[in-house]
């Protein structure tokens, strides 16, 4: 592959990534949730509860940023803070019932949007794309 092809590959990859990011933001509109808030809900939906620093690690954002995300979600009644029974100085964050329902609805909408986006590819190409992308993931 020559340099021109390398540029085309990168350009095509980032064009798809930008388009997917745009579709994701649009899919979140009914819930008035930001992508970072959606990611936090998704992580918390897979856990019982997490400390703020653990959530920050999983989201790969600064602890100060995760505090802002959690504050916004708590103000909307989607998450709650509670004492960590293992360490009274620490605080856990967990989804509320409304937060769990919202996380599920957002996940369902995301799956539907992803299916719509990739539906133009034959199943074999989709499987091949997944294999390639997983091979590139560190």
Image (spheres, helix red, strand yellow):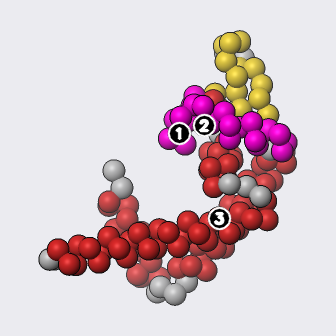
| Number of marks in picture | 3
> Quick one: SS at disc 3?
helix
The residue located at (53%, 39%) in the rendering is 61
Residue matched to label 1: 61
The answer to which image quadrant residue 68 occupies is top right
Query: Of all residues shown, which one is farthest toward the left?
Result: 2
Residue 13's x, y, as percent? 38, 71
With 106 as the anchor, is 122 left or right in this view? left
Q: Mark 3 and mark 1: span between their CA atoms?
A: 19 Å
Q: On the picture, is 74 further left or further right than 36?
A: right
Q: Which residues are magenta?
A: 53-77
Q: Gap in Å between the C-alphas at discs 1 and 2?
A: 6 Å
Residue 67 is inside the magenta segment: yes
Circle 1 SS class? loop
Residue placed under numbered mark 3 in the picture: 25
Q: Please rate how many residues cluster around mark 3, counting C-alpha atoms within 10 Å: few if below 14, some from 14 to 19, many from 20.
A: some
Main SS class of the magenta portion in the image: helix
State yes or no: discs 3 and 1 in contact (Cβ < 8 Å).
Answer: no
Taking 29 as reference, is 115 left or right? left
Q: Which of 33/92 is in front?
A: 33
Could you tell me residue 74's position as x and y percent? 79, 38
Residue drawn at 55 percent across, 83 percent down: 119
Vertical position of residue 121 compared to residue 26: above or below: below
Of the pair 67 and 116, the residue shown nearer to us? 67
State the residue at coordinates (74%, 65%).
29
- Spatial distance from mark 2 to mark 3, Cα to Cα? 19 Å
Tell me, for residue 130, which label it has, or none.
Answer: none
Whether residue 55 can be seen here: no
Q: Which residue is mark 2?
A: 65
Contact, CB < 8 Å: mark 1 with mark 2? yes
């Amino acid at each position: 592959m020559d340099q021109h092809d390398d540029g085309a590959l990168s350009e095509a990859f980032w064009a798809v990534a930008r388009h997917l990011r745009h579709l994701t933001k649009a899919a979140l509109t009914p819930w008035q949730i930001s992508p970072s808030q959606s990611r936090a809900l998704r992580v918390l939906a897979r856990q019982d509860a997490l400390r703020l620093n653990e959530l920050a690690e999983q989201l790969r954002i600064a602890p100060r940023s995760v505090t802002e995300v959690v504050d916004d979600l708590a103000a909307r009644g989607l998450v709650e803070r509670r004492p960590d029974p293992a360490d009274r100085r620490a605080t856990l964050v967990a989804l509320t019932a409304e937060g769990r329902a919202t996380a599920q609805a957002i996940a369902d909408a995301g799956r539907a949007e992803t299916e719509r986006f990739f539906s133009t590819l034959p199943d074999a190409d989709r499987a091949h794309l997944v294999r390639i992308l997983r091979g590139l993931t560190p």
